[in-house]
Every structure is written in C-alpha cells, then in structure tokens.
Image (cartoon, rainbow, N blue to C red):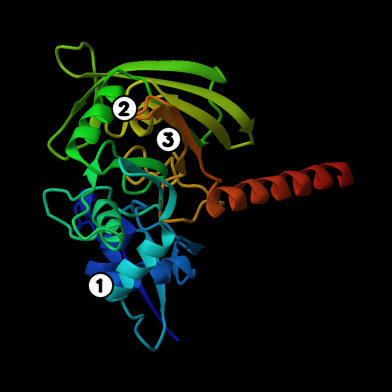
Amino acid sequence: MSQKTAIVPGSIPPPARQLSSVLQNLFKIPRAQIPKLLEQGYVTVNGRIKRQGFHVLDVGDKIAVDLVPQPIAAPSAAQKGKSSSRAIDFLYDDDDLTIVNKPANLLTVPTKHREAHTLLSLVERHLQKQNQGAKAFCVHRLDRGVSGVLVIAKSLEMAEALRNQFAARKPNRKYIALVAGVPAPPSNTLRHYLATDEDLNRYFVPSEEQGELAITHYQTRQVWRDAAFLEVRLETGRRNQIRVQLAETGHPILGDPRYRPRQAEHWAWPHQRLALHAESLGFAHPRTGQPIQMETAWPQEFRDFLRHQKKYLNESENESRDS
C-alpha cells in the first residue's frame, strides 16, 4: 500500500473543494473508488480520518490517501440493480397500490438527467414480474439520501386520489432524525416560506407570494453533548423541507451535504447518507377508505449511532467518577 499526499491549493474554487471532488481532480482517483476509500478510512485531512465525501476543505489542508495496489471495482449496472432490489422491502401490496421501505442513496424518480436506476423503475420491474403490463406512479418522494416508508400507486387514478390526500395534508407522516447540537426549545413547530435558487437549494422568504408554506413539527426524544434524536412530523411536504428548516434553526441533519454541511459532520456518523428516516406513514386507502398505517424499523446506521453515543456517555461517566 502506497500513500500520496497533497496540499489543497488556492486555485481550486470553493464549490469544488468537497473532499470527493478534490480526490477525483487532485489525485486522479476514479469516482467509483472514492466511496470505498473513504468508508475504509484510507483518507485523512490534517492527520484525521475523514469518511464524508461532502466535507468541505480549506486552502492549505493536507490530504493523505493510502492507495490500495488493486483498484476497487465499480459495480456493474446489473449488480446495482440487484443490490437495490434486494434492499427494497415491500411492506404492503394490493391491486391499487404498493408500499415500500425505500433504501437510502436511491432516487425516488428520475431527475432532469433521466436516470434509469430509480426506486420507481425498480418497483415497476418488480410488479411486472407478476403482471407484464403493470405500471408504477409516483405519489410523493423522499430525497435520495433519505430512507423509509413510501407509497406508490398502480394507476393514474389511484395516484391522483393519493396526491389529493397529501395536498390536503391528511396523511400522517412521521420521521426520525439525528441532528447536530441540541434544539431549544425541545419541541416546536417550524413554519416558513421556502423558495428555490438556481442550484436547487431551498431558502427562507418572508411571504407566501415569494415561496411555498412549509410546516414541520418536531419533538426531541434524546439528547447528547453534541447531537439530538428527534421525532419529526410533517404537515406539509415541500422538497427538502425538514432539512432546510432544521438547518436554519442551527441543527442540520447529520450527514447533510447541502445544508450546513460542516456543522452536519459528526464523528459517530461516517455514513454517506442523511440521518433522516421516514419511520411511518398513515393514510386512507383511496378506493376503500380504510385506514392504512405502515411503520418500519430504524436503519442499522441509526441503531449504531445510538449504541456509540450510549457507550461514549458511559465511558465519560466512568472517567468522571475516576477523576
């Protein structure tokens, strides 16, 4: 194993100083290799291991990379499809709709770049194994880095009926989130108007004439020295709503590369995903009117984080008693 080092030069503009971009451009490391190098701790910045590719570097930072002698193979398109299909849990299915547990780091629907590998395309392929003419229609979305419960309609009629419920704020949507710092007050309702800039970032505006109303309710369930575990309920469902509202209150979602990314870094969250999970979803079945309530277990990353925090707290208490 050989090591390469470099100092971040001033010639790299700030938007290109995310660690992943610098590794690719300064070290000429193929994009497909970078997540594995970061995950396995082969990259340090100023002597400290960095596992988050969205970490923003400063001019003068020293980067060291341990390069394994054999390249890390990028998964083929077929392998990607298989791994994501296996990661999708189908929680409920009938003639009108299906409910899934979306894995993190998978787009719900294609963007303007027309990606072929999305949750919607994978679900449709799964449905077509039972019915060759099956279709899947998007009702609502979860951001790429978010996991959790999501309902998909099997016809345009059912999709429109479900979308009407969401527009009327009828579904019960509960998320769990890990955030930087400890919110004060511990429970609150966030009410803001959101607009979008040219880079698709969301930001606050003063009135409904300038943006969309976003209402988020949160309650703090557990706190530590530098982070907190929140239960979040959505009243409205705007894009990036939870992320931007919590970030602008000073408590970004851990692992968020878009909103306050420096503050969103945490030693116990090395994962290339957001610490945000749609835990449950409740709504009325669009055909029968019967209530449907679906819940999912916490992702492993969340359980690991809570375990690490508990261990750290116990060690700190023992040190205090011994001193």
Where is mark 1, residue-wise? Answer: 77
Q: Which mark is residue 217?
A: none
Where is mark 3, residue-wise? Answer: 252
Q: Nearer the viewer, mark 2 or mark 3?
A: 2
Q: Residues within 10 Å of mark 2 (few under 14, many from 20)?
A: some
Q: Earlier in the sequence, mark 1 or mark 2?
A: 1
CA distance for labels 1 and 2:
32 Å
Q: Which mark is residue 237?
A: 2
Horizontal arrangement in the rendering, residue 285 relative to residue 46 (left or right): left
Q: Residues within 10 Å of mark 3 (few under 14, many from 20)?
A: many
| Amino acid marked by disc 3 | Pro
Q: Residue at x 66, y 46 (%)?
A: 309
| Image quadrant where residue 263 sits | top left
Helix, strand or loop for disc 1: helix
In this rendering, the answer to whether 164 lies above or below 60 is above
Q: Are marks 2 and 3 in contact (CB under 8 Å)?
A: no
Percent from the top left, x then y, of residue 19?
33, 59
Q: Residue at x 56, y 48 (%)?
A: 302
Q: Residue at x 38, y 67 (%)?
A: 83
Helix, strand or loop for disc 3: loop
Q: Quadrant of the C terminus?
A: top right
In this rendering, the answer to whether 271 lies above or below 29 is above
| Amino acid marked by disc 1 | Ala
Q: Residue at x 73, y 43 (%)?
A: 313
Helix, strand or loop for disc 2: loop
Q: Nearer the viewer, mark 3 or mark 1?
A: 1
